[in-house]
Amino acid sequence: MQFDLFSLFPEVFTSYLQTSILQRAIEREFVQIHLHNIRDWTTDKHHVTDDEPYGGGGGMVMKPEPIFAAVEGILGLHPGAPPPCPVILLTPQGRVFTQAVAQELSAHPRLALICGRYEGFDERVRTGLVTDEISIGDYVLTGGELPALILVDAITRLLPGVLGDPDGAADDSHAMGLLEYPHYTRPPEFRGMAVPHILRSGDHGKIARWRREQALLRTLHRRPEMLTTAPLTPADHKFLSKYNDRK
Ligand code: ADE
């Protein structure tokens, strides 16, 4: 999978990408991450990438020409031609990024991510270049770089082979529409807090059921709205009905 990241500050990505699982995924060539500086695609003497908004008002707006030139140049596109891969704008106005969106995007062999700065983009970037807009949540950051890293991280760890264990991402919170069950490691008792018996019983059937029930309970208490869309078995419904009555 290839990511092309377009930014005015491509250097901010490097230390995170050189860490832990992402670094290994890059070294082992599960992903290629290409950083592109939008400023390199300006043609004027001062390499200007922003300008004042038409109609007045505060803030600066990112100019369309360098962004179009960068994305079309890197993707090898004729002006106005449809792109060969999703071209995603990171913006608080986009559709909200979720695990399901990460899964959806992980199926593409290549993604182009455009990170903005300043007040926003000239609207023609939206209407004439991008194919998708994504927000990481209902708050506003100073730029799209952190959101782009969040996409790269969440998508890369879903690619086959990236997490050593083939089921590595299968039990994640949100992967099955539920929050994850609690985890424990040694020691068996710490400051008077004991590891639940069942996890040390060696009974894998019981452990699987306990984990499922813990995931259901945690979701019921913390994110009950998720239970309306999670795929639940008859046994799950039966288990939950005991708790629904008591609420
Ligand atoms: N740029 C600024 N804020 C953002 C957000 N919440 N999501 C995606 N891109 C952004």
Image: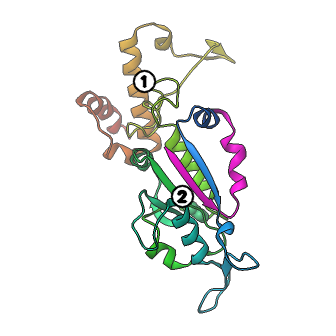
* Residue 78 point in image, percent of width and height: 45, 70
Q: Residue furthest right?
A: 46
Q: Secondary structure at mark 2?
A: strand
* Lower position in the chain sequence, tag 2 or tag 1: 2
Q: Is 173 one of the magenta-colored residues?
A: no
What kind of residue is marked 2?
Leu
* Residue 203 point in image, percent of width and height: 40, 8
* Residue sitting nearer the eye, 88 or 32: 32
* Residue sitting nearer the eye, 235 or 20: 20
Q: Is residue 93 visible?
A: yes
* Residue 130 point in image, percent of width and height: 46, 67
In the image, is residue 147 above or below residue 237? below
Q: Residue furthest left?
A: 234
* Residue 67 point in image, percent of width and height: 58, 70
* Residue sitting nearer the eye, 185 or 112: 112
Left or right for 82, reference 156: left
In the image, is residue 169 above or below residue 199? below
- Name the residue at 29% across, 38% down: 231
Asked whether mark 1 and ligand 1 are closer than 8 Å, the reply comes as no
- State the image quarter where residue 28 is shown: top right
What's the distance in space between the residues labelled 2 and 1, CA to CA?
A: 37 Å
Q: Which mark is residue 211?
A: 1
Depth check, mark 2 against mark 1: the one in front is: 2
What kind of residue is marked 1?
Arg
- Name the residue at 38% across, 45% down: 226
Q: Which residues are magenta?
A: 1-20
Q: Is 13 one of the magenta-colored residues?
A: yes
Asked whether mark 2 and ligand 1 are closer than 8 Å, the reply comes as no
Q: Is residue 137 visible?
A: no
- State the image quarter where residue 246 is shown: top left
Q: Which mark is residue 113?
A: 2
